[in-house]
Each structure stands twice: as C-alpha cells, then as structure tokens.
Amino acid sequence: MSNRSKRLNEEAEEDEEEAEGIGDWERTYVDDRSWEALQEDESGLLRPIDNSAIYHAQYRRRLRMLSAAAAGTRIQKGLIRYLYIVIDFSRAAAEMDFRPSRLAIMAKHVEAFIREFFDQNPLSQIGLVSIKDGVAHTLTDLGGSPESHIQALMGKLEASGDSSLQNGLELVHEYLSQIPSYGHREVLILYSALSTCDPGNIMETIQRCKESKLRCSVIGLSAEMFICKYLCQETGGLYSVALDEVHLKDLLLEHAPPPPAIAEFAVANLIKMGFPQSAAENSRAICSCHNEAKIGGYTCPRCKARICDLPTECTICGLTLVSSPHLARSYHHLFPIAPFDEVPLSSLNNLMPKSCFGCQQSLRGAGNKGGSCVTCSKCKHYFCLDCDIYIHESLHNCPGCESIHRPKSVSMMEE
Amino acid sequence: MASVTSKLYSDDVSLLVLLLDTNPFYWSTTSIKFSQFLSHVLAFLNAVLGLNQLNQVVVIATGYSSCDYIYDSSLTPNGHFESSGTGMPAIFSSLLKKLDEFSAKDEELCKEEDNEKRVASSLLSGSLSMALCYIQRVFRSGHLHPQPRILCLQGSPDGPEQYVAVMNSIFSAQRLMVPIDSCYIGTQNSAFLQQASYITGGVHHSPKQLDGLFQYLTTIFATDLYTRGFVQLPKPVGVDFRASCFCHKKTIDMGYICSVCLSIFCEHHKKCSTCGSVFGQSKLDEASSVANKKRKAPDS
Ligand SMILES: [Zn+2]
Ligand SMILES: [Zn+2]
Ligand SMILES: [Zn+2]
Ligand SMILES: [Zn+2]
Ligand SMILES: [Zn+2]
C-alpha cells in the first residue's frame, strides 16, 4: 500500500510539472482524466467502458470477505455504537491533490457518511472532533441527530497548523470512557498529515486506548504511516489509505455497517427504552426540545413530555425513546442473507429458468452484461448480477426464500 | 420499453406494480367471491393503462406458498384495445391464464405441506421483494423511465414470521423513494401495510363496501405521483409504532432491549432468550444518566 500511494504521489508531481504549461480550462480535463473511461468499439466509435462486470467482481470479493470473517464466530454485531469521528484539519488538509481540496472532499464525504451511519445504526451516536494547530477541538458532543453534526462540521472548514494524533486520541479517550458499558466505543480518524506533533509519548496513549477497548480506525489521505497502522493493529481497527476520491468514499462507507462485535469489548445488558405513541392529530403542545408550540409529535411514556422526533433521549427524564421501525432497521445486520453461488457461463443449460427470479430480466443474451448469473443455495432460484448486488446491499431479503411458505414454528428469531 | 419514444416520458407516466393477494385460505372465507374481486381489479388495471399511453402495469400474485409474476403490460405493447371476442381485452386473457396456472401450482404446494394448524397469511414479503427487484431494474434502464409505485391489494392477515423481511422491503422502498400504496380488504387491521404506506409516503385505505371496490381503486389508487400534490387523498390514521415484547407479544410503551440483539422484553431478565447473552448486573438506567451528566458538564 505504501509503495502504491508513494508512486501515486510521484505521478501526481509529474502531472503537476506537465500541467504548468497549460491553461486552467485544460487543467480541469487533465485532472478529470475523463478519456480513461472511454474505449473504442469494433466500428471505431468511442463508448464508455462497461464496468459492470468488474464492479460485480469487486462486490463479490467484498461479500466473501465479510462472510468469511463472520463464519468463524457466532454473528454478533455491535449495534449500539458510540463513534467519534476525528478529522485532521491541519495544514496538510488544505492540499489540493483531491479536488477542490482535501478539506472540502473530507467534509463532503463525512456528511454522506453521517447520514448513512444513522440510517444503518439508528440507536447509535456520533461525535465530531477536529485537530488543528496541534490541538484537538470538540466540534460536537455525542448525539443522535445527523443535522446538528453536519451543521457543526460545515461551519468550521479551514485548515492550519500541525496535526497531533496524540491530542486527538486523548480527547476522544476521555469522552468515550464515560459511555455506558454496553456501548461499542469506536474512533474513526481521517488523517491528512504525514507527521504527528505530540506533547508526550503516544505509545502510552495507544496502550490506554487499547485498555479502554476503543476500536480505532484510520483512513489516511496521503501515504501509509507506521504510527497509524500500529494504532489500528493494537486496537482492532481498520487502517487504509485512500487513493482517490471514489476510494475515500468507499473506505468511509465501509465503516457504516456495525463491525463484528468482540464479546469482551462491550458488556451485554438490558437497556430501558420507551416507545412513545404519536400524539393525536390536532393536539397542540410545547415540545421540550425546541420549546415551541407544535401540532403532533410524540409523548414520552415516563414523564409525558412532548418531543418532536424519534429516536432521541427525553430531554426531561433521559429515557431513550425509539419507535419499533428504528429497531427493525437494525435487524438485517443480525439475519444477513448468505452470498449467492456463482453459476459460470459454461454450465448454463436448458433446465435453468430463462429469466431472473427477482426482476424477470433475461439471463441469456444481450440483457445480461456480466455473462453469468448467481443462485441462492437455500431456495435454488436464479438471479441476475444486478439483483444479486441489490439484494445483498439494500434489500436484505432473498425474494426466492421469501416466496416459500415457512411453517409458523420456524420463526426467524430462532435461527 | 425501448420501443416507445422516450421523449414522451413526463412526470405523470406511471409504473404500477400490483401485488394481488390470491391466498386460497383467505378467499374461502370472504363474502365477496374472488372472481367478482378480480373483475373490479381488471377494470381498474384497464383504467390505469388508459390514463396514459405510456403507463405500465405489472401484476405479481401473492399466494399462500409461492409468488410469481402473472402480467407485464410492457411485454404485450400492442394489445391494449384488441378484443378477443369474449368481451375482455386480449391482454387480460393472458393474465387470467397465468393466474389459473399460478393458483393451481400454489394449491399443489399447499397440499405438499403438513396439514397442521394453518396460518392464513399470504407471502407479502416475497411479492414485495420481487416488486422492488423489478423496480430496481426499471431504474437501471436509464434516466427516462415511468414513475414506479407499488399497490398491495391484500386481504389476508399479517404473518408475524415475515416481520423482519417485510420491514427490510419497506426500508429499501423508502431508500429508493418508491411509495407503497395499500388497499386492505380484510377484517382486521394490517399493521404491516399501515407501516409500509406511512414510512414510504404511500396511501393506505381499507374500503368498507367491497361492491364498490372499483370506485375506491380508481378514485384513490389510480392517481399518479405528480397529481397527488393536488388532490385530497385519505390521510394516514394514527399508525401505532409501539413495540410488542418478544416474551408475551404484548404491546408495551416502555421496556428493556437487549444491547446485543435488540430483542424487546417487557420486564428485566437475567439472560436474553433470543441471543443467549447474559446481562451484566449494573443498573443501566442510572449508569447512562450519570454518564450524560458527566459528559455535558464541561460545556455548561
Ligand atoms: Zn421523559
Ligand atoms: Zn434480476
Ligand atoms: Zn433464496
Ligand atoms: Zn413480555
Ligand atoms: Zn439478545
């Protein structure tokens, strides 16, 4: 990885030298490299490259990796997560190898990540910390509302000074050591700089993070650094270095689904929660979150305070308030569907159905770009590659398995 | 789809995916016969196809032991108004033929199973999943496509064992911004369909008079997504989002949740009956509120 990113940096430098002689308008195309996405067909016409087969292969590799990791242990996921996102806003973040700058790109993708995170982990909380001028600042406290985090992040977009990994870790460690024992403590660091300017021995800080069971992951934006790699190894996190913007986005989104839980990392516990009923259509009350008179909303079952939105913590009595669909959003992490088996083109025969069970697209001929199809090992139905991806990434149901009657006694929860 | 002039696609061209409940156990208990019901539905489909030349209709049968596609108007593009001599547009004779085949197969599959206590729910989770796969394919087909929506015509009661799968489908539809309309003609209320329509922004209605089903269908469910901005459709009635506990299936408004698997219990247990985790002794409620106070202290 380090070699690769170094080489990329060199290339970038070469590009810059070349680019000096050209105008701004040309430069946007040079940076874009849009010609790389074209290929010539038989008749000499330019066409966009068909990436679907490559894309599908990548997706299958990722899926296999995930299921292999889960196979060894009993599937447990850290569903209640307390995640601090630490963003490096040091001088290095102003660099423009990502367009328009690392800073802007980081902010853009962190925003998308925060939304995706709360979509997948409705009961979890995020906090934001920035590192700037050698000091770590708190942007937001742990909280469950995506909007307030995004607002705080977008308000402070400037880069200066040195970066300090140790200061960032110390601050986050202090916050995360106070969360309840059933929560999974995670830190995700977006690191631009190639150095760290620390007040003390960072090795001690890393050991303390390890002892407090903080799972630290780092996404680098320039090149691999030993100290980041060491941090991730010690605390069980993931370390990766983004090659370009698309890669950065993928790396970030990899952190959205709950990580496999390591039993000793969090103590299982029962959490008291309230399921508020929505207030009657035309009842007007002052909500406890904004202190404004509003129609509708929900009523806390313990203290009867009015709140606007779920999920939240009651501002009066502190009870965690959710609705049953919020819990249901997380259930697919617990009952994942197994990867489908690939059926190679050569074994296509007449016994096989002609079209995809999910979307009815023909599995033979022009409609099927990838050239092969997949089959579910449980229900034996065949699917096209596009449905394969959709089913595993978004739907989380096998249409075939759902179209077979299950006797009532075999409930999903008992699997 | 490629044959039609793509220029003509505008906001009000619809793709209607109709999920038709064919559960024989349900239809054996109703006052209205399935054939009567079907004639209302066919007239409705004809009306939808007539509203706009480019409208597309797909019908998926939701059976007791299987689900299948029984009709796709894009496969028979020229048949709209040809009569087959039976007083029925030719396209629907193919639908009826497919439906007959499907019902025969579905009933055969029922017989194969052991005849224990039957739950008369149909496979809503299966047909919803298939509908979403189909819609996903329409989205893949390019920038110009009809506006998709799903309509569940359901009479059978909810199958509790489908809960996770139905919710997964609802969330996926929400992400794709596909509304799920539901017309529930059964006797109890369907919590699944109420939630599906509420979460995805669709319309839920349970008609009182089944003789007038056609009228309900055309006045409420024939409106395309664009027109919905201008007409008064039935408002969602209070959807109950309270949870029911896993131990007694009792609806509760306060309860305990296993931090590992999110199972819901109405009282404190020592061990989770779903995932087997043994719960720690600390009094959680207090622990979390103390942590909150500590956490917020430096700010104030
Ligand atoms: Zn309260
Ligand atoms: Zn398909
Ligand atoms: Zn299957
Ligand atoms: Zn109970
Ligand atoms: Zn549990």
Image (cartoon, coloured by chain):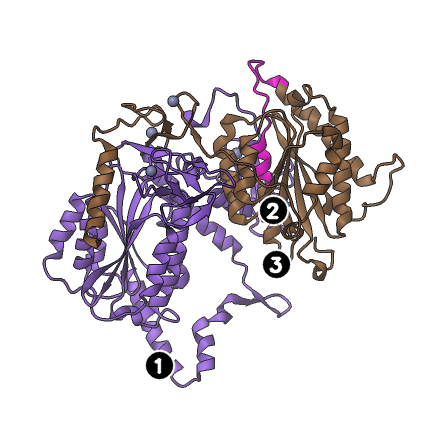
Residue B232 in the image, given as x and y percentages of width and height: 65, 46
SS for callout 2: helix
Please report the bounds of the magenta region as a residue range: B111-131
Judge by depth and name the residue closer to the eye, A390 or A370: A390
SS for callout 1: helix
Q: Is B112 in the magenta? A: yes
Residue B54 in the image, given as x and y percentages of width and height: 73, 52
Q: Is A260 drawn above or below residue B225 in the view shown?
A: above
Q: Is residue A44 left or right of residue A265?
A: right
Outermost residue toward the right? B85
The circle on residue B135 is: 2
Chain under disc 1? A
The local crowd at label 3, few if under 14, some if 14 to 19, many if 20 or more residues have their Cα within 10 Å, is few
The residue drawn where x is 21% and y is 44% is B293
- Kind of residue sitting beneath label 3: His
SS for callout 3: loop
Between tags 2 and 1, which lies in front?
2
Q: Residue A321 sits in which quadrant?
A: top left
Letter of the chain shown brown in the rendering: B
The residue drawn where x is 74% and y is 56% is B4
